[in-house]
Amino acid sequence: MDELELLKKDWQKKEGNLPKVSYADIYKMIWKKSSSVVKWIFYISILEFVFWTAINIVFTDGESWEMIKSWHIYEFTIFLMVMNYIVLLYFIYKFYVNYRKISFTDSSKDLMKAILTVKRTVTQYVWFNLIMFSISLISGIYGSLRYGPDSDKIINAASEAGNEIIFWTIIVGVCIFAVAILLGVIWLFYKVLYGLLLNRLRKNYNELKELEV
């Protein structure tokens, strides 16, 4: 008998003395971890909603609204704000529903489906925020350039110099670059914030798949 066989026999002897962990015990541990992660996603979404609402209230005063009106984007801004709040509240509700669904799941297949649903909801939530931020930023840049206090002077000067096309090309290029940089920063923020939680869910999902094999 070679050394490998001796090692196997020795390990089997030791393994026999270890406490047995049942399928139900493993499932329960994964279920608890998944439920905790989804609960944190729900709490973070509420904190994020409260934070941005407070920022809007504190920094958006009468003077800011007058400036937005002068840029001719007042109605559009109001529309974006209302739609943003409605959709964000919907996502908070979805996170709560996902949490409740996982909390009362009693099978590994249902738990796997619930985990995939949570991941899909978080992805949709992040993309919605990125799109809304892009639209808000682009509308603000357009309003300030088109209707700002010095916009006529800048546009007329570019037109008189015969560089209007070059001027707008540069402006559009700078705006795209600025929007891309800011979106990258926000995406990185969400990647760190929700990415860590989703990685835990992904790990739990893979463990459940192994249980089903």
Image (cartoon, grey):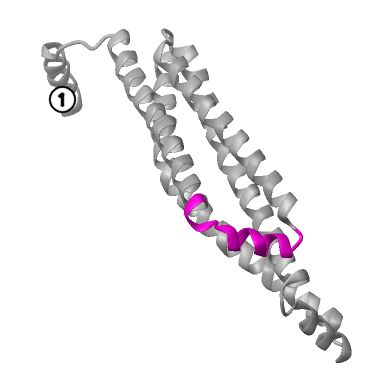
Q: In the current view of this chain or complex, which residue is farthest to the bottom?
A: 161
**What type is the residue that disc 1 sits on?**
Leu
Residue 73 within the magenta-colored segment of the rendering: no
**Which is more toward the observer, 49 or 163?**
49
Residue 25 visible to the viewer? yes
Is 71 contained in the magenta span?
Answer: yes
Q: Which residue is mark 1?
A: 7
| Residue farthest front in this picture | 62
Which residue is drawn at the image coordinates 41% and 19% (left, top)? 208
Other residues around mark 1 within 10 Å, as few (<14) / some (14–19) / many (≥20): few
What secondary structure is the stretch in magenta mostly built from? helix
Q: Nearer the viewer, residue 147 or 133?
A: 147
Q: Left or right: where does residue 14 sit relative to residue 174? A: left
Task: Give the residue drawn at x 66%, y 39%.
Answer: 83
Which region of the structure is painted magenta? 57-72
The N terminus - image quarter: top left
Quadrant containing the C terminus is: top left
Q: Position of residue 200 (x, y in %)?
A: 38, 33
Q: Of 112 and 88, which appears nearest the observer?
A: 88
Tag count: 1
From what the image shows, is residue 173 above or below residue 117? below
Apparent side of residue 168 relative to residue 213 in the rendered image (left or right): right
Which quarter of the picture shows residue 50? Answer: top left
Left or right of 35? Residue 115 is right
Q: Residue at x 72, y 80 (%)?
A: 150
Write the residue at 38% across / 27% down.
39
